[in-house]
Image (cartoon, helix red, strand yellow):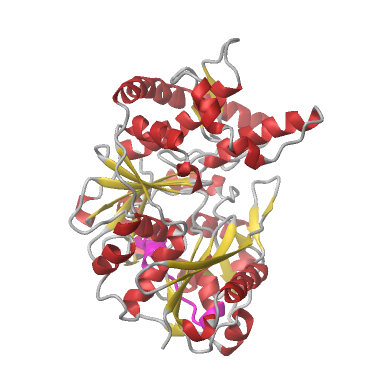
């Protein structure tokens, strides 16, 4: 009998295959860089066939690291980047390239739909604010601009759903993406009121069946087995969206604990709190996501910053470009290694930075495709170290901005993502929210969350709560309390951050009119 569960996580930047033992210990990981194309019109697309080939390559690479991976694997679970639109025809073949969550072309449709009298009903049903990332907005836009694509399609899938189709031949989606896009987060089912509010009644047939991956698996197809190096018939579990899987693996929900949250500090910033459906806070602004997790009677209240560490990447790349022009090229990793030193050289709370560096604008806690990043408060005395601190403080303020529309700020925030390895960065994030920080020490929380679902589905763990105790709790670091003086300072500065964020809207509109960006 086998002794490994494999989690496949197809992210925006990297596709990873990770092997775990039944108790949640990570055995090995293999990865393949992901690729997508950007267009001047706000397009962000990905070749679907290449995505499948890259996912299969990641699994084959894992087999090269783990002896007899095929014979030892008792289950494969798949998750992936959320939102976006991956269309397939009746034969399961792609209908053009996938639209990613980064695609901003649906901005005019979002503005039209959000102005509708039906928008509040749609929001209160899904618990999710409409934005350009989502399949609902993208399908509505494609229906107006490229209707022939929808006429050729049989199913509208998400990234993980597409990989599940190639692995098993079964077109399906999971309760998380189904409900926050087209359904009711309380029932985890499709809702006709939501579909009507999006104007998609004529395309209702494109929505695939909903599978609960902790209860149902499907066998790996022979042709998929040949492509991946796994054994035909291996049970395949369709996981929830990667945000939910990462949060599950990082400790967003621990049995018998409350007043905690989870933030994923990666290319984007994802901020989540697990609550019972009746405790979900529907904010007046109509923003955020309601994403169920594979735990009975628990849904995550989510706000997502379009860009988190992408802001820091931009600043470091700017420094790298200047050094290269002076004949002193330096690797990004060397600049990353300087961050702690720059923070030590700078004074907290001197410059404000709004971290809206994505060309798609912002989606949490407000939706504005025209939002752009910027510094406020610069003077001649400020140097590069001050800019580095301002960018990281901006990530902390953006995190607080997101948690602030969910209700009271959490007492503890569990952190995951490569950036949180920095103690100084963690200290800034904790102080910005006035909360304890607790790091998830697990390297691949998203793949782990998906593998946890397979462990429950296959009976290797008796329940998700039992699985969390075995897989998650041992991998959480000790609580790190916020510095009280820094928390007091950031509490004062946050008011200025918020005032500037609200006051910048006319400037963003003016810049969009001049630059040809999303209007």
Hey, which quadrant is residue 183 in on the image?
bottom left
Q: Main SS of the magenta segment?
A: helix
Image point 55% across, 62% down: which residue?
A: 85
Q: Is residue 175 magenta?
A: yes
Q: Is residue 519 visible?
A: no
- In the rendered view, tell whether residue 129 sits above or below residue 299: above
Q: Position of residue 336 (x, y in %)?
A: 59, 38
Quarter of the image containing the C terminus?
A: top right
208 or 325: nearer the viewer: 325
Q: Position of residue 472 (x, y in %)?
A: 33, 60
337 relative to 18 in the view: left or right? right
127 or 500: nearer the viewer: 500
Q: Is residue 32 magenta?
A: no
138 or 333: nearer the viewer: 333
Q: Position of residue 476 (x, y in %)?
A: 33, 52
Among all residues in the image, which is located at the extreme front?
67
Quarter of the image containing the N terminus?
A: bottom left
- In the rendered view, tell whether residue 434 sits above or below residue 233: above
Image point 54% across, 54% down: which residue?
A: 101
Image point 61% across, 87% down: which residue?
A: 223
Image point 61% across, 75% down: which residue?
A: 64
**Image: magenta residue range:** 166-183
Hey, which quadrant is residue 406 in on the image?
top left
Q: Position of residue 509 (x, y in %)?
A: 56, 29
- In the rendered view, tell whether residue 387 sits above or below residue 362: above
């Amino acid at each position: 009998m086998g002794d490994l569960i494999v989690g496949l996580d197809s992210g925006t930047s990297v596709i990873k295959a990770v092997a775990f033992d039944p108790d949640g210990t990570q055995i090995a990981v293999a990865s393949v860089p992901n690729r997508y194309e950007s267009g001047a019109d706000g397009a962000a697309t990905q070749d679907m066939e290449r995505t499948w080939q890259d996912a299969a390559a990641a699994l084959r690479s894992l087999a090269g690291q783990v002896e007899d991976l095929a014979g030892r694997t008792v289950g494969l679970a798949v998750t992936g980047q959320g939102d976006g639109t991956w269309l397939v025809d009746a034969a399961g073949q792609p209908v053009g390239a996938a639209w990613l969550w980064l695609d901003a072309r649906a901005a005019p449709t979002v503005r039209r739909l959000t102005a509708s009298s039906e928008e509040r009903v749609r929001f209160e049903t899904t618990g999710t604010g409409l934005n350009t990332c989502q399949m609902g907005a993208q399908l509505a836009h494609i229906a107006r601009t490229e209707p022939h694509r929808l006429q050729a399609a049989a199913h509208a899938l998400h990234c993980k759903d597409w990989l599940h189709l190639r692995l098993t031949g079964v077109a399906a989606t999971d309760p998380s993406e189904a409900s926050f896009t087209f359904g009711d987060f309380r029932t985890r089912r499709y809702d006709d009121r939501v579909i009507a509010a999006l104007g998609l009644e004529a395309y209702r047939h494109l929505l695939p069946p909903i599978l609960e991956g902790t209860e149902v698996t499907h066998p790996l197809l022979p042709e998929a087995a040949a492509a991946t190096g796994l054994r035909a018939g291996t049970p395949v579990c369709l996981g929830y969206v990667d945000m939910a899987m990462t949060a599950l693996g990082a400790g967003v929900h621990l049995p018998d604990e409350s007043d905690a949250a989870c933030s994923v500090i990666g290319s984007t910033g994802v901020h989540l709190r697990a609550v019972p459906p009746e405790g979900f806070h529907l904010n007046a602004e109509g923003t955020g996501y309601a994403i169920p997790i594979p735990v009975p009677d628990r849904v995550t209240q989510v706000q997502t910053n379009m860009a988190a560490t992408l802001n820091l990447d931009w600043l470091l790349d700017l420094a790298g470009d200047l050094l290269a022009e002076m004949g002193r090229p330096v690797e990004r990793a060397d600049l990353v290694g300087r961050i702690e030193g720059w923070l030590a050289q700078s004074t907290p709370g001197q410059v404000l930075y709004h971290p809206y560096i994505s060309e798609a604008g912002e989606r949490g806690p407000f939706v504005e495709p025209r939002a752009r990043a910027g510094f406020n408060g610069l003077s001649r005395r400020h140097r590069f170290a001050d800019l580095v601190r301002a960018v990281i403080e901006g990530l902390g303020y953006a995190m607080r901005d997101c948690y602030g529309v969910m209700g009271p700020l959490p007492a503890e925030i569990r952190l995951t993502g490569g950036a949180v390895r920095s103690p100084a960065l963690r200290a800034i994030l904790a102080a910005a929210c006035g909360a304890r920080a607790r790091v998830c020490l697990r390297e691949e929380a998203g793949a782990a969350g998906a593998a946890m679902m397979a462990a429950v589905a296959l009976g290797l763990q008796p329940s998700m709560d039992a699985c969390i105790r075995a897989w998650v709790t041992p991998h959480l670091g000790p609580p790190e309390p916020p510095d009280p003086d820094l928390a007091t300072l950031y509490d004062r500065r946050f008011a200025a951050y918020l005032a500037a964020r609200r006051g910048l809207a006319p400037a963003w509109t003016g810049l969009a009119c001049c630059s040809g960006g999303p209007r």
